[in-house]
Image (cartoon, helix red, strand yellow):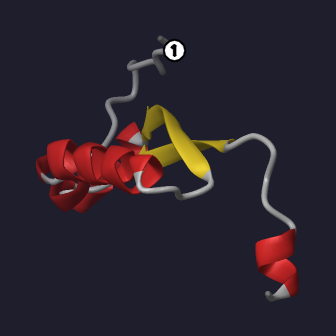
Amino acid sequence: MSSLEEKKLKKKFNLIIFIESAVGMLNLPDICRRANEISEMGAPFTLEGIVFGSDDYLANIGNTKLRYSTSVSV
């Protein structure tokens, strides 16, 4: 048995994913579904949250942030 196998985590860590592109947004349902499947198969994480990178997303789609816009926290 390897030393990694001997040191199993007692608790899964929380995974937070970042979506910052149009492709990431389109693939979001599949990304979430797959993360949950992998977690259930024994991966050492649980999908805990998603962060939307609005400025990077806007740059990715060729747009810019308006001068008077503000960030939103949910």
x 59%, y 48%: residue: 45
Q: Residues within 10 Å of mark 1 (few under 14, many from 20)?
A: few
User: Which residue ends up furthest to the bottom in the rendered image?
Assistant: 2
x 51%, y 14%: residue: 73
In this rendering, is residue 8 above or below 12?
below
Q: Dot 1 lies on which element?
A: loop
Indicate left or right for 50 with 8 as reference: left
What residue is shown with label 1? 73
Question: Residue 37, how many percent across, how many down?
Answer: 32, 50
Question: Residue 1, how many percent across, how many down?
Answer: 79, 87
**For residue 69, what is the image quadrant?**
top left
Question: Residue 3, how many percent across, how many down?
Answer: 88, 83
Type of amino acid at the residue the image marks with label 1: Ser
Q: Can I make out residue 19 in this image?
A: no
Question: Residue 51, how many percent across, how many down?
Answer: 46, 36
User: Which residue ends up furthest to the front in the rendered image?
Assistant: 1
x 39%, y 57%: residue: 38
User: Which residue ends up furthest to the left in the rendered image?
Assistant: 26
